[in-house]
Image (spheres, rainbow, N blue to C red):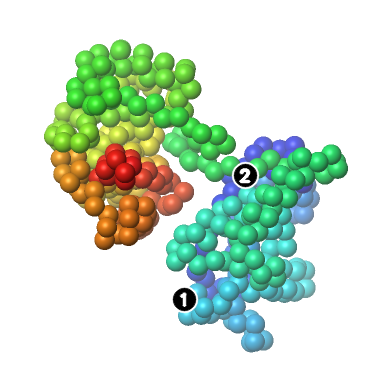
């Protein structure tokens, strides 16, 4: 929170929408949304104080300022304008675009930079300050760091942290590195194969010990994906993973990711209490995976690989891709876009470059 800091933390995001509404009509529409969600718009509430929702227009692109009635372009795609700088008046209201305080708010600039980096990758330029969202964010962080190291009495505000929403209103907060503890209930995984595949209680003890040792996520896998591994039938995979997920949930609420390439396993695991789907194939193995994860509304880890565990180590040549780094970025971003098209928003995606999968030693 800023300005009034004696209130709970809040979630903040930025969205890009396409509209035919002129700015003031758009403002009226979002105020109606705020009212419907319980915000007190009477003017009697504390400014910057606690509120259930707060919607702002940060930037507006495509507004035709030459017409007296203030028409908007039919679609954003019909123009190549950068955001406009507008000051508009109505009898009881004044609207300033861009939002006059957006450049002093990390919790605004950080998600705006996400928008800038997504999509077509073009910079979003502040029409008054003539700087991109990334430039404004870097300047703000530098200034905040400078102020935190001084004794000038200037008020400090907590930094904005990225979060990953989980089922049941929980979330992972990326204010520090989060350790993922690996628990394979398989007979043949390269790290712990056979150690925890015969006893649910032994697997439970290992999971609880990893949580005690600092793991923020327990990753459970029922199919080995080591190089050369044979595929496991779905029924066998379910038999391996469901009992331990259910048993952990009886003892702990630690976040659980299910390491699977199969949509049926992913759905059953989430229903049993898992929180995140971790697919080493990036959604390429099972054509139903992306749609299934989207329907559940849970986070998904999309890993880069080529082929399958039996063939991937013959697919380590990235010469045509201008090197392994360029190749992994291109192919992984293609999976991210496919996931987004299927209904998994970017804020629910975690991207894994796939060390050890379709890469030789130098590639890794």
Where is residue 221? Give x, y as percent: 28, 29
Q: Residue at x 31, y 17 (%)?
A: 203
Residue at disc 2, secondary structure = loop
Where is residue 357? Give x, y as percent: 27, 41
Where is residue 1? Give x, y as percent: 70, 43
Q: Residue at x 27, y 44 (%)?
A: 359
| Image-based side of 27 in relation to 331, left or right | right
In front: 315, or 218?
315
In front: 50, or 349?
349
Check residue 355 in the rendering and tell me which mark sits there, or answer none: none
Where is residue 82? Give x, y as percent: 58, 74
Residue 143 visible in the snapshot: yes
Height in image: 37 above or below 244? below
Crowdedness of circle 2 by 10 Å Cα count: few (<14), some, many (20+)? many
Residue denoted by label 2: 160
Q: Residue at x 64, y 55 (%)?
A: 137
Residue at disc 1, secondary structure = helix
Furthest residue in direction right, as rendered: 152
User: Between tags 1 and 2, which lies in front?
Assistant: 2
| Image-based side of 91 in relation to 166, left or right | right
Check residue 77 in the rendering and tell me which mark sits there, or answer none: 1
Q: Residue at x 20, y 36 (%)?
A: 227
Furthest residue in direction front, as rendered: 362
Verify CB contact (< 8 Å) between mark 1 and mark 2. Answer: no
In front: 361, or 286?
361
Q: Disc 1 to disc 2, how far (Cα)?
A: 32 Å
- Which image quadrant: the C terminus? top left
Question: Along the polypeptide, which appears first: circle 1 or circle 2?
Answer: 1
Residue 293 visible in the snapshot: no
């Amino acid at each position: 929170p800023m300005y009034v800091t004696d209130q709970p933390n809040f979630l903040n995001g930025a969205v890009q929408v396409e509209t035919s509404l002129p700015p003031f009509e758009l403002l009226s529409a979002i105020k109606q949304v705020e009212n419907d969600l319980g915000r007190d718009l009477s003017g009697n509430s504390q400014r910057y104080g606690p509120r259930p929702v707060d919607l702002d227009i940060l930037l507006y692109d495509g507004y035709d300022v030459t017409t007296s009635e203030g028409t908007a372009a039919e679609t954003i795609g019909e123009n190549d304008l950068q955001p406009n700088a507008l000051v508009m008046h109505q009898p009881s209201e004044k609207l300033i675009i861009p939002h006059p305080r957006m450049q002093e708010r990390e919790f605004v600039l950080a998600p705006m930079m996400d928008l800038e980096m997504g999509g077509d990758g073009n910079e979003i330029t502040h029409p008054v300050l003539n700087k991109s969202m990334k430039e404004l964010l870097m300047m703000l962080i530098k200034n905040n760091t400078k102020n935190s190291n001084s004794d000038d009495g200037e008020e400090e505000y907590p930094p904005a942290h990225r979060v990953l929403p989980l089922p049941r209103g929980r979330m992972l907060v990326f204010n520090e590195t989060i350790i993922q503890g690996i628990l394979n209930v398989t007979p043949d995984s390269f790290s712990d194969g056979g150690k925890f595949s015969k006893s649910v209680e032994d697997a439970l003890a290992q999971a609880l010990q990893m949580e005690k040792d600092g793991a923020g996520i327990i990753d459970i896998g029922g199919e080995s994906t080591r190089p050369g591994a044979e595929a496991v039938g779905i029924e066998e995979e379910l038999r391996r993973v469901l009992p331990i997920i259910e048993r952990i949930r009886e003892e702990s609420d630690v976040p659980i990711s299910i390491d699977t390439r199969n949509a049926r396993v992913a759905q059953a695991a989430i229903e049993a209490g898992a929180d995140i789907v971790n697919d080493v194939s990036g959604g390429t193995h099972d054509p139903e995976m992306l749609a299934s994860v989207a329907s559940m509304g849970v986070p998904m880890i999309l890993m880069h690989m080529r082929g399958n565990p039996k063939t991937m180590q013959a697919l380590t040549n990235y010469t045509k891709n201008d090197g392994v780094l360029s190749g992994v970025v291109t192919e992984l971003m293609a999976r991210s876009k496919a996931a987004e098209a299927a209904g998994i928003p970017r804020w629910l995606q975690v991207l894994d470059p796939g060390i050890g999968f379709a890469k030789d030693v130098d590639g890794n």
